[in-house]
Amino acid sequence: MAVPRSIARGVAVSAVTAALLPPVPALADDRDPADLPALAISLTDSRDRIEPGEETDYTLTLRNDGERAVEGITLAQTGPPELEFRRPGEGGQVRGGAVTWQLSLEPGEEAVRTVTALMNETGSDVWRVAVTACAGLAADPAPIVCASDANLLPAATAADTAVRDTGLTGLPAPLLKAVCAAAALALLVAAAAGLLYWRRTSMERRAA
């Protein structure tokens, strides 16, 4: 998900200079957690900044922390249109702006998957690119766990300077952190919703 620089100016320097989307353990929904597989997920490309024309390698790690085997897992990573997924490893498939893998995990087993992505040109006011990875069961389109990662673009420097020079934020640190956390959660929910729509559309096409 790409974020315009104008939004950055309304938040704060710390919102520009930090990766705002830490991994989260699960998405809240109506399902009973006791009925869901105990999956844990992480996503990183081991960098904080990227420029148009550069490639980056994402590493997704999915672990089965439960006591029973989990079969029919779909692991998917999505990103903004400006980020082009290339060379998915270990049998991954790129379709419609997402890369997916099909997995099965024994108790305690961990799967590591990688994908290379190219950062294409963006608008001058886009200061950050964020990606999200989610895992769920192929028979159920709702994700079980998700994680996100974000990189700053060159426009972030200009946004940072504007905040410091004009004093656009006078927020106390606790409130500022809360605003950043709320923005991060909103981006994560939007990305998960996009993944849910993509999976449902794929299932409908297969059933047609």
Image (cartoon, grey):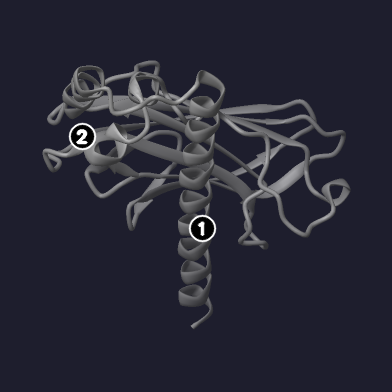
Give the percent coordinates (x, y) of residue 109.
71, 27
Quarter of the view holding residue 84: top left
Residue at position x 39%, y 27% from top?
58
Please report the residue visible at 55 percent of the width from the left and 44 percent of the height from the top. 134
Residue 165 left/right relative to 94: left
**Residue plotted at (68% across, 41% down):** 26
Is residue 60 among what the camera can see?
A: no
The answer to whether residue 6 is left or right of residue 135 is: left
Residue 18 visible, this angle: yes
Quadrant in the picture for the N terminus: top left
Using the image, determine if residue 93 lies above or below residue 46: below
Query: Taking 179 as reference, is 140 left or right?
Result: right
The residue most toward the bottom is 208
Number of marks in the rendered image: 2
- Local packing at callout 1 (Cα closer than 10 Å; few below 14, some 14-19, many 20+) is some
Nearest the eye: 193 or 75: 193
Q: Residue at x 43, y 43 (%)?
A: 92
Q: Which amino acid does label 1 sit on?
A: Ala
Element type where label 2 sits in the image: strand
Contact flag, marks 1 and 2 (Cβ < 8 Å) = no
Q: Nearer the viewer, mark 1 or mark 2?
A: 1
Numbered label attached to residue 182: none
Quickly name the residue at label 2. Answer: 119
Q: Is residue 122 above or below residue 112?
A: below
Residue 162 x %, y %: 19, 24
The part of the image, by quadrant, that contains residue 18 is top left
According to the picture, the residue beneath numbered tag 1 turns out to be: 193
Left of 185 or right of it: where is 99? Answer: left
What amino acid type is highlighted by mark number 2? Met
